[in-house]
Amino acid sequence: MLRISSELLSRLQVLADEDRGREVCGLLLGAGTVVADIRPAANVAARPETRFEIDPAVLIAAHRDARAGGLQVIGCYHSHPGGRAQPSAEDARLAAPDGQYWIILGADGVMAWQAVAQGDVHDRFIPVALASPDSVGQR
């Protein structure tokens, strides 16, 4: 289960809605299975309408901040404008089986995934439930 506040999910949706013609992307920051913040990044892919590539300067800065005691990079997010909220074959090809979390925003909603070896989707991803940090442990 990946825990993320409804406020952060709303921010992700606003970012995706602001640029429906391109995949938006950025980093998930936190610790373990808790997303405490997001860091939007420019999509520097050659074809940003169908691919995403996080600006390397944003990634380097986030890792530098983490080494200085800040939040860790625990994954990334991106949108599939007009598409489904599940990883594409291209996402799987580019993903390392490193346990990082991916949140994908699609026309059919928002879903979370974890990049692993021999996953259920494209042999790279497993689905992960999303929950609000406040709802964990509640019935």
Image (tube, helix red, strand yellow):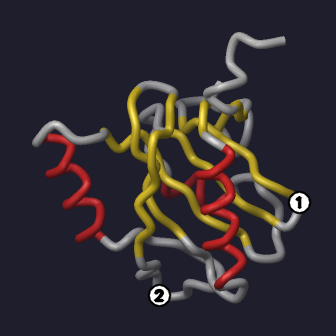
Q: Quick one: quadrant of the N terminus? A: top right
Q: Quick one: quadrant of the C terminus? A: top right
Examine the rendered structure and indicate whether residue 33 appears above or below residue 82.
above
Q: Secondary structure at mark 2?
A: loop
Disc 1/disc 2 C-alpha distance (Å): 25 Å
| Location of residue 70 in the rendering, given as x and y in whole percent from the top left corner | 22, 41
* Of residues 97 and 129, the one drawn nearer to the viewer in this rendering: 129
> Looking at the rendered structure, which numbered label has been put on residue 108?
1
| Location of residue 97 in the rendering, given as x and y in whole percent from the top left corner | 47, 37
- Sequence-first disc among 1 and 2: 2
Question: How many neighbours does mark 2 have within 10 angstroms: few (below 14), some (14-19), or many (20 or more)?
Answer: few
Residue at image point 77% right, 56% down: 85
| Location of residue 137 in the rendering, given as x and y in whole percent from the top left corner | 70, 10
The quadrant holding residue 71 is top left
Residue 124 visible to an observer of this rendering: no
Residue at image point 75% right, 76% down: 81
- The mark lying in front, picked from 1 and 2, is 1
- The residue tagged 2 is 46
* Of residues 24 and 92, the one drawn nearer to the viewer in this rendering: 24
Q: Secondary structure at mark 1?
A: loop
Tell me which amino acid carries mark 1: Asp
> Looking at the rendered structure, which numbered label has been put on residue 37?
none
| Location of residue 20 in the rendering, given as x and y in whole percent from the top left corner | 72, 84
Left-right relation of 139 to 70: right
